Image (tube, grey):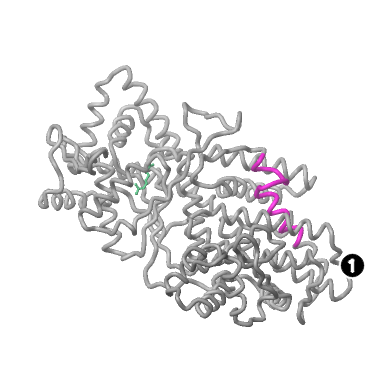
Amino acid sequence: MKILSRELGKLFEAAAAVAFPELSPDQIVKFVTLEKPADTAHGDYACPAPLRLSKILGKNPQDIAMAIIEKMPKDYRYESVEFARPGFINLKLSKDFLEEELKILEGGFSVEGHVSDKPVIIEYSGTNAAKAMQVHHLITTILGQSLSDLYEFMGYEVIRINHLGDWGTHFGKLIYAVETWGDRSEIERNPNSEFLRLYVMFNTEAEKNPDLENEARKIFKALEDGDELRLAMWNWMVKESLKDLEKIFVRLGVHFDHIMGESFYLKMADEILADGKNRDMFVEGEGGSLIFNMGEDKTPALIQKSDGTTLYLTRDIATVKYRVDTWHPASILYVVDVAQSLHFEQDFAISKALGYAEESKLEHISFGRMSFADGAMSSRKGNVILVEDLLEEAVKRAGELAAKKAGEMPREELARIKEIVGIASIKYGILSQDRVKNLIFDWDKMITLEGNSAPYLLYSYARANSILEKGRMELTGMPRLNDPLEIDLVRQMLKFPEVLEGALNERKPHIIATFLYELCQNFNHFYGKLRVLDASESEKRTRLGLLRSFMHELKTGLTILGIPVLEKM
Ligand code: ARG
């Protein structure tokens, strides 16, 4: 399918160019656009050009609108173009065109893809080895996966990377803890929860005995200097921990093209330090540390500690250089918690100053903090909420919902459904919220058959499916649209390509979720009001076609959100 606002926009551009030859091509592209009308009863698209060109042309909006309307190329796709106050031209799609598009939609949904020879790198998850996966890691993992799928669906080549946190001072602490209190076989049985336990233990002990911090620092320094025994221990810890993380990735249906640890960039970090020093980019700070000045009023960035060990930031600068040299990407998106905004500001500025990447290619896709609705979740150990616990709770609640709804069902079937619905609810709960705001986590809103939730969307799909199965019929010949509710549903469905493009441009999957929710509401309304299975032959043909198109779109959208549909529910 085509992005209609773009296609129809060309008609307005052509008309404006003929009506007002004094406008430059740039002005036309800039001002003659199509947007959503304030009230869809007045049309499918609104062109704000008359309002926006009024000053430039020195004419009143209505005269401009009339002049453009007069020159509009004839096109069967629209039924009318009309002036609307204060300065818009509203376009209404024609019934012939809607019927033709419905016929195409019945066969499946696709979008005319973007063509580029350069990939987009999307980095997400950034989970830490030997540390428990936390709620913000769950958000980036789900958000990043969905953005990658969206880019891919829209025709981009995507490279998915998990920048695994497998290096840093916490390994000094952990190795100390494992050597002092750890039990190898216990760790191999339950790697991440053991690592968490040992890490918490280290911190409690270090409060009583500050000397431990020093010991940990020494161990980390030994690691950076290449101490073989310590490196072997580190290697084993990362490997064990990844086993656990991978279980979560499988459960979430998430995958990466590369899982590359921060440790991979260690050697390159040294080159970068040398490079910057040679070019006098860095200044010396306290105790022989190195600093990059970000400019007036800005916090200077520390890039080498006084003991000579590298920093998270230095490894990230090396990462930029490596990615650009290796993949020549069109852009690199970093899906990471808003708490790291300063970090990425520094990373991008220094990478630019050193000539490793254009800053415009680097983008921090940040997201807000998760807050829990009253009593939604309390943590089992200390103050961390474990992702595993969240998933378990969701699956349990989804099971309760399914049992209430469907009554008795075979045990295996219930197990399958509750796993799918539980995970889907968590994903949708995250993806349906605007990522730049703080996210609210509320079981009652996420796991329910009403409102903007995964179960509601999945149920709408299964409902349409069961009707379609009962009504088995070849969708031959053209569908004919007569009822306003039918027309409304097609008009809404034709907006989907634009919605996907908008979500991509803003890197915000919730735009897709909102659309799907409204689509389901519209479908349920349609089905509540109109007969389908017992309608006349020609109405039945049209309405089953609508149902099938609805299912194609819903399935496409849910797939991009990482949610598989259920044929029955
Ligand atoms: N591992 C980091 C953390 O848990 C996130 C990594 C983000 N990505 C990056 N390129 N720095 O905070």
Position of residue 121 measured from the top left corner of the image (x, y, whole percent): 38, 60
Question: Residue at image x 36%, y 50%?
Answer: 163
Category of crowding for the residue at label 1, using alpha-carbon neighbours closer than 10 angstroms: few (below 14), some (14–19), many (at least 20): few
Foreground residue, 436 or 547? 436
Q: Taking 355 as reference, is 480 left or right? A: right
Kind of residue indicated by mark 1: Asp
Which residue occupies 58% across, 60% down?
Answer: 559
Q: Position of residue 141 (x, y in %)?
A: 47, 49
Query: Residue 192 vs residue 111: left or right?
Result: left
Q: Is residue 227 among the parts visible in the rendering?
A: no
Q: Describe the element under mark 1 as helix, strand or loop.
A: loop
Q: Quadrant of ligand 1?
A: top left
Nearest to the observer: residue 525 or residue 94: 94
Q: Is residue 241 left or right of residue 80?
A: left
Where is residue 240 drawn, in percent x and y?
Answer: 39, 44
The quadrant the N terminus occupies is bottom right
Residue 302 visible, this orientation:
yes
Quickly name the residue at label 1. Answer: 534
Tell me if residue 343 is in the magenta stretch: no
Residue 302, located in which quarter of the rendered image?
A: top left
Identify the magenta region. 445-464
- Does residue 178 lie above or below 341 as drawn? above
Which residue is nearer to you in this view: 44 or 469? Answer: 44
